[in-house]
Amino acid sequence: SALANGTATVSAQATDAYGNASAVVTDAVTVAMAATAVGDVHMLTYDGLRYDFQATGTFVLTRSTTPGDSFQIQIETSPYPINNAASITTKAAVRLGDDVLLFDPAAKDFVTVDGAPDTALGSASATQVFAAGKLVEISSAEYRVEWSTGETLTLTNQGYYLDTSVALGPHNGPGSVQGLLGPDEGQAYDFQL
């Protein structure tokens, strides 16, 4: 069966070469399916719907519908420079509490915080803490934003465009988000005008 966001129970039992079985171990694990926007923008919604997004402009990739929750990611898409027949994600803006983080592969400073160059990072695995979460530099081309409410965004700088992967937190239920990645309440509701 397909995994869905939420909690799943996993049971395991080992058997050695002589046929001796161990005790069954059962544990509950949290499953957070990632939604993505990659390449010339191939989307995968929280509910597993795949589609291509070829518009250009500034769009809400995903945001919370819960009052007081600042979780929000916007993307800017531009024509694909090789053929102009598709679009790519050229910037991503993230609301992390009262702070705004901007990721722009074409800028001198790939990461800015509240409009100023981010000088707190610079080495692999560096972490910068904010009031509403943190920014982790995984490598010079990959960053992860972690909200204190549990959501995560992983951004990969592909040189002239960005790939993004977003996982919701444990408190995000169906309909708690909206945007290009859907409301997380079934594929039938992913495109609502």
Image: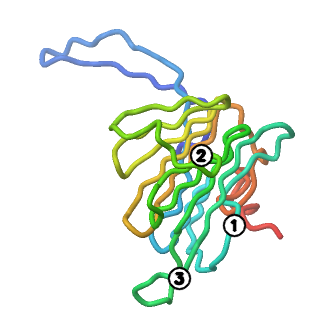
Q: Earlier in the sequence, mark 3 or mark 1?
A: 1
Q: Which residue is mark 2?
A: 113
Q: Position of residue 32 (x, y in %)?
A: 56, 39
User: Counting other residues with Cα less than 10 Å from the Cα at mark 3, is it few (<14), some (14-19), or many (20 or more)?
Assistant: some
At mark 1, the secondary structure is strand
Determine which residue is flagged by label 1: 59
Left or right? Give the position of 137 relative to 32: left
Asked which quadrant contains residue 173, the reply is top right
Image position of 9 (left or right of 63): left
Residue 71 picture quarter? top right
* Inter-mark Cα distance, 3 to 2: 26 Å
Residue drawn at the location 67% of the way across and 31% of the way down: 132
- Hey, which residue is sitting farthest right in the picture? 67
Up-down relation of residue 43 to residue 81 (above or below): above
Badge 2 density bin: few <14, some 14–19, many ≥20, Cα 10 Å: some
Task: Tell me the crowding category of disc 1: few under 14, some 14 to 19, or many 20 or more residues within 10 angstroms, Cα based.
Answer: some
- The quadrant of the image that shows the C terminus is bottom right
Q: Which structural element holds mark 3?
A: strand
Q: Residue furthest left?
A: 17
Q: CA distance from mark 1 to mark 2?
A: 20 Å
Identify the amino acid type marked 2. Val
Dot 1 amino acid type: Phe
